[in-house]
Structure formats: structure tokens, C-alpha cells
Amino acid sequence: MPDGLSLVDQVYFQGLAHLYARFHLKVIDRATGSREKGQMSYQYDLSKRSQEFESDLAKWHADLRKSIEGALSRYRKERTLEAADALADVLEGKLQ
């Protein structure tokens, strides 16, 4: 198996390898193999998109927390109207 694959990619790679081995050993015919590959590809696509969404969501959340902590730290150091406005902007979802 190639190095550096995510878990979803590893499962898909192993599934395809098993499918191709069964086809070459004449355990399944071409139509069955094609149908199974289509189902496997569909599940892979769903899993891959889910993994990417979770990764993007985690990055967004980390960036939001970082922005909030930065604005809060700035406000605690300098209690000015500008610092308060910056904190309010971050809390309202306007990332800096």
C-alpha cells in the first residue's frame, strides 16, 4: 500500500485490491465487479467528502478560537473602544 494515505483512502485502496483479485481469480464476473466498484466508489466519495468537511470545520473552529483569544487578550491589555469593537466584531463572526 502506498505511504501517506488517509484511513479512508487506505480502505478504498484495500477494497479495490480485493475486488480486482476476486475478478482475476474468476470469482466474480465483470458486471458484478463493475456494480461493486460503483458502490464502493460512491461510499468512498461520501466518506472522503465527510472527512474533508470535518477537517475544514475543525480548521474554521480553531481559527475562530484563535481570533477570539487574540481580540480578548488585546482588550484586556488596552481597554479602548477600538479594542472593544474588534472583540465585538470577532464575536459576531467577522474574523480578523
Image (spheres, grey):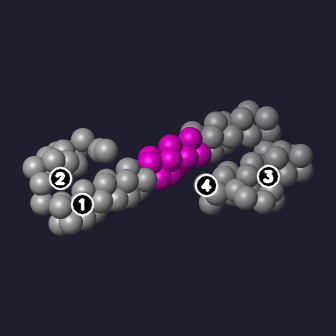
Q: CA distance from mark 2 to mark 3?
A: 58 Å
SS majority, magenta: helix
Q: Which of the two labelled residues, at mark 4 and mark 3, occupies the earlier sequence position? A: 4
The quarter holding residue 4 reads bottom right
Foreground disc of the pair 1, 3: 1
In the rendered structure, which segment of residues is drawn in magenta? Answer: 43-56
| Image coordinates for residue 49, horizontal then vertical, percent | 50, 43
Q: Is residue 64 left or right of residue 46?
A: left
Disc number at residue 8?
Answer: 4
User: Which is nearer the eye, 3 or 21?
Assistant: 3
- At numbered mark 1, what does the secondary structure look like: helix, strand or loop? helix
Q: CA distance from mark 2 to mark 4?
A: 44 Å
Foreground disc of the pair 1, 4: 1
User: Which is nearer the eye, 80 or 50?
Assistant: 80
User: Counting other residues with Cα less than 10 Å from the Cα at mark 4, is it few (<14), some (14-19), or many (20 or more)?
Assistant: some
Q: Is residue 45 magenta?
A: yes
Q: Is residue 41 magenta?
A: no
Disc number at residue 83?
Answer: 2
Q: CA distance from mark 2 to mark 1?
A: 6 Å
**Looking at numbered disc 4 in the image, what kind of residue is underneath it?**
Val
Q: Residue tagged by mark 3?
A: 17
Q: Is residue 42 visible?
A: yes
Marks 2/1 in contact by CB < 8 Å: the verdict is yes
| Image coordinates for residue 35, horizontal then vertical, percent | 66, 36
Q: CA distance from mark 1 to mark 4?
A: 41 Å
Residue at the image position 30 percent from the left and 59 percent from the top: 70
- At numbered mark 3, what does the secondary structure look like: helix, strand or loop? helix
Q: Which of the two labelled residues, at mark 2 and mark 1, occupies the earlier sequence position? A: 1
**Looking at numbered disc 1 in the image, what kind of residue is underneath it?**
Arg
Q: Which of the two labelled residues, at mark 2 and mark 4, occupies the earlier sequence position? A: 4
Disc number at residue 74?
Answer: 1
User: Which is nearer the eye, 30 or 39?
Assistant: 39
